[in-house]
Image (cartoon, rainbow, N blue to C red):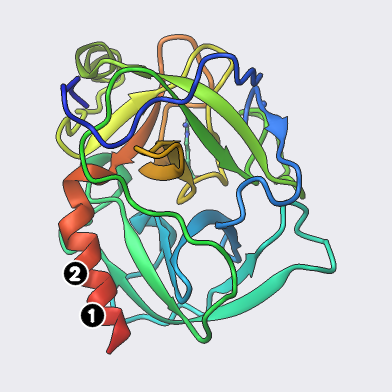
Amino acid sequence: MTAVLTTDARPVEAGVTVRPVVGGLVAPQGKFPWAVRLSMGCGGTLTEPRVVLTAGHCVDGTGQNDGIEVTAGVSDLRSRSAQTARSERVIRAEGFVDEVHGDDWAVIRLDRPLGLPTLPLAQDPIGVGRYVVMGWGQTREDSVQQEQRLHYATVPTVPDDKCAAAYEKAGVKLVRDEQLCAGSPGVDTCQGDSGGPMIGRGRHGEWVQVGIVSWGLGCARDGYPGVYTQLSTFRPEIKKAIRKLRN
Ligand code: ARG
């Protein structure tokens, strides 16, 4: 991620206080209506009534149906108002190898459209600031369980240079154009949050998706921020894949 001057996605207002996700809060019902849980243990977003956007490493590959079950419209997965759908078809980023090498996105066509709000993709690279991340994943690195209720947290962006330097020590090379880093000690996404969104505010104050939870060294460790798919880089490709899914 590089700081740029023009962007359609602004950081969230300071003052949205959030502590677990690691270090966040439980999302009340309806707060993030396009957030979905996938049966393989990932998150995702409804980017069209019939299309879910998730991480590439959450699916088996393009053309696969994967037999994914989608739970939507709820913060609490056991809520009776949960809506469910199944995957019909998957398209994964062509260049995907594994999450640390970038291209970590995939789109899933559902067997029916869901009557829920959708989350638009940000067009431009994001600026420095704080963004919201969420998921039903672990609230601690050493936790053995996933959460029943959606958790969210606010995380500050971490400059590419700083993030790349940290991960270089761990033997991983950051793909700067395709990945962005965010997090602070004690606040981060974690295992099971993959595929879920990082969001910011659009021009009119609406939520827009700026990233996809991808990977990190442990969770919420000092000096090792979470790494997210940089959506602005992939927007044209993702839009194209969604068009393909319509046929
Ligand atoms: N790869 C993880 C998953 O499949 C996401 C890990 C995110 N880690 C982090 N420290 N932010 O759920």
Q: Where's residue 15, x and y in %?
A: 59, 14
> What's the residue type where badge 1 is placed?
Lys
- Taking the image as shown, residue 150 lies to the left or right of residue 100, namely right
Tell me where residue 199 appears, x and y as whole percent: 44, 38
Task: Assess disc 2: are there few (<14), some (14-19) or many (≥20) residues with their C-alpha within 10 Å of its C-alpha.
Answer: few
Instruction: Note whether 89 is above or below 211 in the view shown.
Output: below
Q: Circle 1 is placed at which residue position?
A: 244
Q: Would you place residue 18 above or below residue 162 in this image?
A: below
Q: Nearer the viewer, residue 7 or 55?
A: 7
Residue where numbered disc 2 is placed: 240
- Image position, residue 105 (x, y; %): 31, 55
Can residue 42 be seen by looking at this rendering? yes
Kind of residue at disc 2:
Lys
Q: Quadrant of the N terminus?
A: top left
Mark 1 residue crowding within 10 angstroms, few (<14) / some (14–19) / many (20+): few
Q: Position of residue 46 (x, y in %)?
A: 48, 63
| Ligand 1 lies under 8 Å from the Cβ of mark 1 | no
The quadrant where residue 225 appears: top left
* Left or right relative to 55: residue 174: left
| Residue 93 appears in the rendering | no
- At x 23%, y 71%, the residue is 241
